[in-house]
Image (spheres, rainbow, N blue to C red):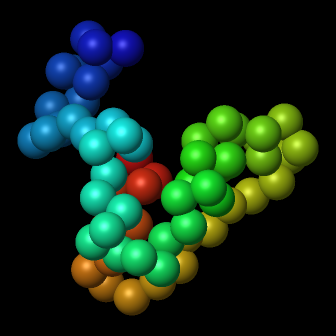
Amino acid sequence: MESRLKQAGFPWVKTLEQFEFGFQPDIDRKVVQELAGLAFVERSESVSLLGPTGVRKQLLSG
């Protein structure tokens, strides 16, 4: 995994544990943790992250 992250050339790598939930209090930490378990994949469900710009959706989807 580390070599793939290096190859990707991301400017930084953040984990879910490093996400600042206090920055956007409308984000439900329990829902994010459930999605991180990937059970939706086993159920063949889709997930869409919706919201205005500046709420760090890309950090959650990465």
Task: Judge by depth and name the residue closer to the eye, 60 or 46.
Answer: 60
Above or below residue 34? Residue 58 is below
Location of residue 46 in the rendering, given as x and y in whole percent from the top left corner: 74, 58
Q: Is residue 47 above or below residue 8?
A: below
Q: Residue at x 24, y 30 (%)?
A: 8
Percent across and percent down for residue 30 are 62, 56
- The N terminus - image quarter: top left
User: Position of 46 compared to 61: left or right?
Assistant: right
Q: Give the tally of numbered discs.
A: 0
| Rendered image quadrant of residue 14 | top left
Q: Is residue 32 left or right of residue 18?
A: right
Q: Is residue 35 above or below residue 5?
A: below
Q: Position of residue 38 (x, y in %)?
A: 69, 38
Whether residue 58 is visible here, answered yes or no, is no
Residue 58 relative to residue 39: left or right: left
Residue extending furthest toward the bottom: 52
Give the residue displayed 28% in from the left and 14% down from the top: 2
Residue located at (48% from left, 79% from top): 26
In the image, farthest residue toward the left = 11
